[in-house]
């Protein structure tokens, strides 16, 4: 029998199932992928150099662009690195607020994941539900920071302002609503035989290769490996929170989805705990005039756990008003390029966007 012709196809950046502005070049025989190559560069870039040409506080307008769906971990990681170099203390109340904001960021990002993962399998109703429900979380961000997407709220020394009047009650009511909605999401997605058949056994990351390949976040925990910066190296008020790190065996889309399913509920629990345990006091250890603020010469490495996995910032100061070097290690580079190119081979072409959504790819983290 004649060998099927090998065809090259370009999926994205216009494809609605592709995560962000990126393209995947695939070679296929029939409908089976024989080779995959991820390409980015269809978006804003060079963030690291842009940060190095701004003073220590002006950089925060750039940080948010590393990952638009979840900008807050970038703010926190950079702030923690600067605080370590300078030796600046953070008020205890600010640590609780920061932790709450990080979990709010995770939760609203999970809402987008629900939409992308369900839509990529043809279940469009849940996408409409989750994106709509996400707006209630964005309302909280707007009340707290003044912005719905870009917040620029966490910065060296604490946070920009305290909780507004009535925020706690509104946040708790929103958590109650989202928690009930997650029950409906489970029925529509996880109990759906279409999703089960599309997700189980697809996009497998071998558990014995996960560490070697540098997999992080839900994809790593979906390989049965328990790793989470919030537990392994607690920061802010995570040592005061009671939560678990879920793991599942299999390394496929189904396992990664099960991890995120539990983590979404964990985020709700942590937000409630932060609001209930939050101490009184100041929220900001004020820095000098930003235009005159000089950080002592030194270097620091800080990392946090984003919804996509571990995010790290290496920051170097030469004692001036500007960062000497800022290098970002995002989860998207490994999960979205190195690993994705490997696990796409042998898969059906219809599963490209399905697999990408399960990996939590944020292209600007790659083209930084």
Image (cartoon, helix red, strand yellow):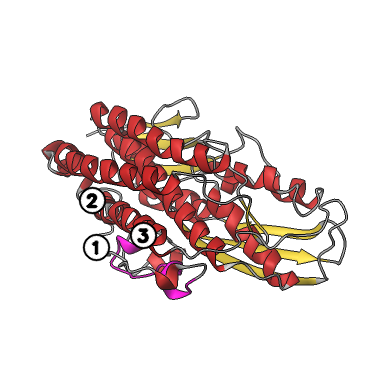
Q: Residue 18, how many percent across, how many down?
A: 43, 34
Magenta segment: does it hold 230? yes
Determine crowd level at label 1: few under 14, some 14-19, many 20+ residues with C-alpha closer than 10 A: many
Q: Which residue is mark 1?
A: 248
With 263 as the anchor, is 362 left or right in this view?
Answer: right
Please name whichever residue, 83 or 305, is drawn nearer the observer in this view of the structure. 83
Determine the secondary structure under disc 1.
loop
The magenta region covers 221-234
Q: Quadrant of the N terminus?
A: top left
Front tag of 2 and 3:
3
Q: Earlier in the sequence, mark 2 or mark 1?
A: 1
Please name whichever residue, 141 or 281, is drawn nearer the observer in this view of the structure. 281
Residue 254 is marked as: 2
Q: In the picture shown, does residue 95 fall above or below 30?
A: below
Q: Residue 340, how many percent across, how many down?
A: 42, 49
Q: Earlier in the sequence, mark 1 or mark 3?
A: 1
Determine the secondary structure under disc 2.
helix
Determine crowd level at label 3: few under 14, some 14-19, many 20+ residues with C-alpha closer than 10 A: many
Please name whichever residue, 323 or 93, is drawn nearer the observer in this view of the structure. 93
Q: Which residue is mark 3?
A: 270
Overall secondary structure of the magenta stretch? loop
- The answer to the question of whether label 2 and label 1 lie on touching residues, with beta carbons closer than 8 A, is yes
Q: Is residue 3 among what the camera can see?
A: no
């Amino acid at each position: 029998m004649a060998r099927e012709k090998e065809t090259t196809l370009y999926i994205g950046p216009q494809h609605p199932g592709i995560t962000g502005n990126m393209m995947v070049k695939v070679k296929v025989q029939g409908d089976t992928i024989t080779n995959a190559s991820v390409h980015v560069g269809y978006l804003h870039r060079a963030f690291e150099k842009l940060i190095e040409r701004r003073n220590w506080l002006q950089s925060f307008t750039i940080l948010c662009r590393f990952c638009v769906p979840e900008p807050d971990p970038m703010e926190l990681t950079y702030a923690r690195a600067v605080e370590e170099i300078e030796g600046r203390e953070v008020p205890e109340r600010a640590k609780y607020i920061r932790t709450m904001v990080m979990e709010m960021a995770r939760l609203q990002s999970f809402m987008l994941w629900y939409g992308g993962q369900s839509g990529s399998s043809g279940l469009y109703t849940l996408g409409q539900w989750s994106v709509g429900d996400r707006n209630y979380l964005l309302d909280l961000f707007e009340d707290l920071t003044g912005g719905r997407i870009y917040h620029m709220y966490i910065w060296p020394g604490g946070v920009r302002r305290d909780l507004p009047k009535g925020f706690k009650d509104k946040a708790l009511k929103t958590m109650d609503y989202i928690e009930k909605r997650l029950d409906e999401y489970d029925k529509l997605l996880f109990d759906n035989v279409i999703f089960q058949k599309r997700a189980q056994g697809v996009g497998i990351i071998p558990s014995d290769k996960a560490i070697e390949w540098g997999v992080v976040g839900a994809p790593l925990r979906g390989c049965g490996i328990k790793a989470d910066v919030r537990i392994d190296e607690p920061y802010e008020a995570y040592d005061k929170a009671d939560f678990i790190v879920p793991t599942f065996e299999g390394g496929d889309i189904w396992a990664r989805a099960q991890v995120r399913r539990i983590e979404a509920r964990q985020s709700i629990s942590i937000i409630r705990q932060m609001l209930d345990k939050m101490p009184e006091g100041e929220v900001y250890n004020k820095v000098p005039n930003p235009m005159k603020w000089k950080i002592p010469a030194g270097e620091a490495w800080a990392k946090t756990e984003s919804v996509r996995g571990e995010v790290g910032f290496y920051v170097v100061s030469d004692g001036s008003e500007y960062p000497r070097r800022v290098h970002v290690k995002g989860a998207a580079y490994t999960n979205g390029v190195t690993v994705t190119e490997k696990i796409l081979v042998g898969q059906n072409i219809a599963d490209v966007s399905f697999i990408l959504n399960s990996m939590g790819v944020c292209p600007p983290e790659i083209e930084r």
